[in-house]
Amino acid sequence: MRHIEIVKVGYEYAGAAGAVTALREVTFDVGASEFLCLVGRSGCGKTTLLNLVAGFLPPTHGEIRIGGQAVKGHGLDRGVVFQDFAQLFPWRTAQRNVEFGLEMRGMGAGERAETARRFLRLVDLERFARAYPHELSGGMQQRVAIARALAYNPAVLLMDEPFAALDALTRDEMQRLLVDVWAQTRKTVLYVTHNVAEAVYLADRVIVLSPHPGTVMADVRITLPRPRDPLSLAFLDCQRAIVAHLGGRG
Amino acid sequence: MIRPRARRIVGAVVAFGLTALAWEAFARSGSLPPAITPPLEAIAAALAGMIRDGTLFVHVGYTLARIGSGLALAALVGVPLGMLMGRVRSIERFVLPLVSVLSPIPSLAWVPLFILWFGLGNTASVALVFYAALFPLILNTWTGVCAVNRLWIRAAESMGAGSGAIFRHVVLPGALPFVIAGLRQAFARGWIAVVGGEMIAATRWGLGWVIFDSKEFLNTDVMLGSLAVIGLLGLGVERLVFAALERRTVERWGLVQSVRV
């Protein structure tokens, strides 16, 4: 079942030297409950594409549909996790951050707290419910952000390099945790990264974008069974195939 | 090892002790007539007298009431205005030039006019505090709203917050560090304004008035005693009100590091 449809999407913005085409004729679908990684070099427009799907920007050409409905602005059917740890509200505890979306939906305080606790448990942070963001490590803050984006139960989770600013060990842990969370919640995930190994570890499918302007260069299905071993030969083969699409050595 | 807190206290005691000694030496040296350089003992006696007959508390009460009401009015006007400037371009364009020109005028320069407009008494002093406090509040609040992290707004939007909810749940708390900084500045400026204003515009009560009134009878001990009270009160409000406010909010949230002098 197609959940997200991206149809001939283009995006242009006004640069210093006239109009710049960031994305051209981008077309692909994301299936329901599919984990799709969007990979490309810096400046290939992958974050722009995510912002279009999130509804923060309107596409200049083409259309994006979610569940058959054209995207018009942001909506509660999508949860967004950004790269920057500063996305959490510093004046709210971890739990109150997770409650935010529920509060906006008008959920009562008791039910809200209970739901928030449940999602903090999902990311293994229930003990830190009362901590403020600045008291948490970067990895913990990103876990709170994931819980916050999931708590109001959107069908789609959009993630923009959420682990890029973390150290390598923490990033590995976070990737394992994210696969667990995804397996439990069965969200449709659109995940932007420039890290090929990360994409191969996480994704059902990898879309490779070429830069200037961003267009779809390859659509690679990853069929390795989970949990995946990043040191196995099959894993490295997948990685090599994607790196080749990116035009690197491999 | 001496703890930092103990060190600070020792430092303060030494500084005040040395200053008091220097004053005492100067006062008793006879380089100026003793009547206008009273020794510490006389200053303490004057203060004790004002405490005994209760007049000190009335003066302090009047001064605090004037600055309190002036500051409250300024916050009621300045904070919403600064918020609006930060959110609505046309209001920013309209208000900013006015604020930029009025803000550098020292509040005390308005005293003669305020006396003509409001007469002698409380109104002129309160108006003076209002004037002095208004601009730091407007400017800091405005800066605070402009400095709110765009990512917070995006995150709130993605979770279904409308513009009203974003204002209440994101912009207000996000701008708070600046609003508190504005209140601090406003108090510092208002404190100068209220004492200065009372000297000229007050009629019977207030710390500024008592200093100016003492000049008539050369009561330099009362003058110096009142000055000490003004300094201590200013420090006390800063410590008890603003520092406490910061500890509970922006410091708790990790938005500013604690700065203790």
Image (spheres, coloured by chain):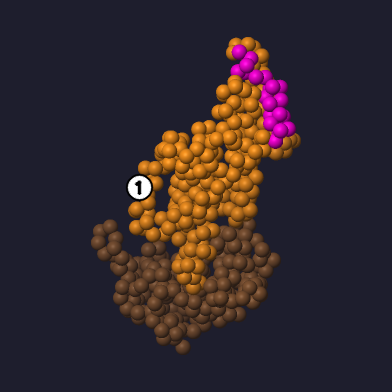
Q: Position of residue B208 (x, y in %)?
A: 56, 33
Compared with residue B224, is residue A31 higher up or lower down, i.e. above or below? Answer: below
Left or right of residue B116, residue A185 in this image: right
**One can see residue B100 in this view:** yes
What residue is drawn where x is 66% and y is 27%?
Answer: B16
What residue is drawn where x is 40% and y is 78%?
Answer: A71
Q: Helix or strand or loop: what does disc 1 sit on? A: helix
What residue is drawn where x is 41% and y is 55%?
Answer: B85
**Dot 1: within a 10 Å radius of its alpha carbon, few (fewer than 14), some, or many (20 or more) residues?**
few
Residue A144 painted magenta: no
Q: Position of residue A68 (x, y in %)?
A: 41, 86
Residue carrying label 1 = B97
**Display colour for chain B:** orange
Q: Quadrant of the C terminus of chain A?
A: bottom left
Q: Nearer the viewer, residue B39 or B254?
A: B39
Q: Residue furthest right?
A: B1
Q: Nearer the viewer, residue B144 or A231?
A: B144
Q: Nearer the viewer, residue A249 or B74?
A: B74
**Residues shaded magenta:** B33-54
- Give residue A153's quadrant in the image: bottom right
Q: Position of residue B209 (x, y in %)?
A: 56, 32
Q: How many marks?
A: 1
Q: Chain of mark 1?
A: B
What residue is drawn where x is 54% and y is 50%?
Answer: B72
**One can see residue A84 in this view:** no
